[in-house]
Image: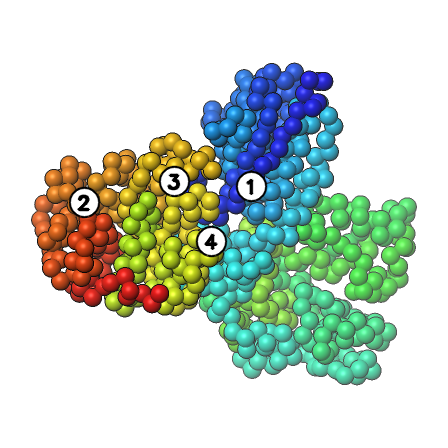
Amino acid sequence: MPQLLDKKIEILQIKHIRGPNMWCWVEVLEAWIDIGELEDYPSDKIPGFYDRLVNKLPSLVEHRCSYEERGGFLKRVEEGTWPVHIMEHLTLELQGLAGFAGGFGRARETTNRGIYKLIVASPHEQVTRKAIEYARQLLLSLIQDQPFDLEPCIEDLRELIDDLCLGPSTREIVNAGVKQSIPSIRLSSGNLVQLGYGALQKRIWTAETAQTGAIAETISRDKDLTKSLLSTVGVPIPEGELVDNPEHAWEVAQSIGLPVVVKPQDGNHGRGVFTNLQTESEIIAAYKVAVEEGSGVLVEKFIEGDEHRLLVVGDHLVAAAKGEECKVIGDGLHTILELIDRQINSDPRRGSSEDFPLNPVRIDSIAHLELQSQGFEPESIPALGRAVLIQRNGNVAFDVTDLVHPSVAKKVVLAAKVVGLDIAGVDLVAKDISKPMEEQGAAIVEVNAGPGLLMHIKPAKGKPREVGRAIIEHLFPDNSVGRIPVIGVCGSSSAKEVAHLCAYLLKLANHYVGLSSEKGLYFNQHPVQRMNSSEWDSGRRTLMNPMVTAAVIQATPKGIINEGLPYDLCQVGVITSVDLQETFPEDSIVEERQLFSVHRTQIDALIPEKGIAVLNADEAISAEIAEINPGKEIIFFTLNHQNTLIEKHRSEGKSTIVGNPEAIHLYKGQKIVYSIPLADVAYFQANKSSKNLLEIVSAIATLWAIEIPLETIEAGLEAYSPESLEV
């Protein structure tokens, strides 16, 4: 299509919005896209576009779009829609094909013709930036009827997700926390995550927690010490001892009886572990590999049976998986290496990333020794029908949780406790996990800290187990959620002053207070940093401080537009005022409805059915914002005792506050429950302005919402001045 070959789509800028925002509740990227002359070419005006799109990405049929039905988006394309709307769906689909399913998306016009905002949910900023660029390239190729190789793009996104996003074990725990309304903060580029806020936080690193002791982890790495402790309390272990050299290894093997296992004293992930060794040459060869993997070598009696991994969380066994042998069957034509690829690695459950329950089989030193014991080399061609063992216990990924005998469960829980681990992966060898260990000569061979969870989350066979939920319930018992009181304050004016006043009064109520405002970051009234960093970063720091028992975080309208809120949910959301004339043309925010969307973000972020909105009844917009309140209650405040919104609220038996130059009255329904005279409040008496009065009234409403004693509030007001903060 010659007339379209010179048309361009240009990405002008990309904004990373990291918290709840005017678009949605999750992290998004907002890209500004210039489609130029393509503004005149909706999809129905491009011959063949629909067919090319469907042929390239048939999975787009699952996108419901505004029709709220399967195929809804494709229906929009057929009827005619604009390029950035199509880019939105392409970006989401590319992310989905790479492993990030679902997600929020929007395409919106700006005040400039041909320039649009593209907003999409982001698993990671770098991933979504790349997905947007690939969507742009793909869209242009479809418009211009040019070839485009999609698979390398999807593979690139997959690799980025694997490298940059949380691993499956950590993600499982975090997602379980989300279901229990526990917030999370990623503390590193790896898998270190904070669950909860402030003083109620817990930390995890994959399946290790802040409760996992350093001594316990050290013990678990020392296999000989672990065995000694287990033996002390009667847990069955294999006979064996540490050895100093290959000859000593052979002597011990003869002493305890063949076959034996040779393994590193402090290795992990099965590296350097050789099983079922029968001869001196095998044992010497195994020693030479094992000694390179750890600080010492163990020789143990070989236990007949299958390898099992049992996951202990707290006082409970929560999941169990079994390993299975990996074999190939000779066909008289292909080498063992070729048979492995044909018969084993072709299994779609096998892959190199953490999302696959089974790993590809490779000929490592252990497998090589196993082959040699059967008279083979990797290049050998087994006879037709000849079974060749490659791995004695391939991947431990076959769920057997429901088969575990109760006495076995008790033994593995005891093993974890003896080592001192709150979360442990216990390796046990048994012929039949449904029978007591003593009946079959079974033994526990290792107790591991930080066990992988993927085998239980996504077993190769059997029922997935909710191990993430078990860990969350262990860290946050009795449905606790790890939330300190978080007060979010927003407004066109007075928000900073209200935030500082609230922080001061909270400290008087014996809270260690984190305060983030336009002035800077404060911990318990002490300035930590002037506001030369972003609002989001400053607010986030208040929630990461393990001393903070209450946080007050101011958000400016500009901050909400550019970064979003630094928390997922807050207990109290305050809107002091809304200036509908305050526009942000540089962000294409110029209409009242757009300003409404910005300010309502503060109320959208309330804890559902528990949070409290504090709204200025003198603002016309407050009644409409109140209608979308997801929390349990609204406290209206006013400087006008004849305010109709206040009167209606009061007639319904709800909480209101009315201020005048003499006193501030707190109502529950029609009844005054408390009055605070202003004669001794120096902050007001200094100039007796309505602005100061508004700040005092809204601060009182905020602290009343979190049940700070009214006597404390009154006493604090009498002592407060803006200089109360060390600035």
Q: Answer with mark 2 or mark 4, whichever residue precedes in sequence.
A: 4
Q: Could you tell me how far apart the alpha carbons at marks 4 and 1 are, in whole angstroms?
A: 17 Å
| Residue 638 badge | 2
Q: Position of residue 202 (x, y in %)?
A: 45, 64
Q: Position of residue 361 (x, y in %)?
A: 76, 54
In the picture of the structure, the residue carrying the numbered disc 1 is 14
Q: Position of residue 550 (x, y in %)?
A: 33, 61
Q: Position of residue 105 (x, y in %)?
A: 51, 35
Q: Residues within 10 Å of mark 1 (few under 14, many from 20)?
A: some
Whether label 2 touches label 4, CB < 8 Å:
no
Residue under the image location 36 percent in, 60 percent down: 515
Q: Answer with mark 1 or mark 2, whichever residue precedes in sequence.
A: 1
Q: Amino acid at mark 2?
A: Thr
Q: Answer with mark 1 or mark 3, whichever residue precedes in sequence.
A: 1
Which one is closest to the eye, mark 4 or mark 3? 4
- In the displayed structure, would residue 174 be above or below residue 60? below
Q: Quadrant of the N terminus?
A: top right
Q: Amino acid at mark 3?
A: Val
In the picture of the structure, the residue carrying the numbered disc 4 is 534
Residue 419 picture quarter: bottom right
Disc 3 secondary structure class: helix
Q: Could you tell me how far apart the alpha carbons at marks 2 and 4 are, in whole angstroms?
A: 32 Å
Residue 579 picture quarter: top left
Work out whether residue 18 or residue 293 is closer to the camera in this orientation and state it. Answer: 18
Disc 2 secondary structure class: strand
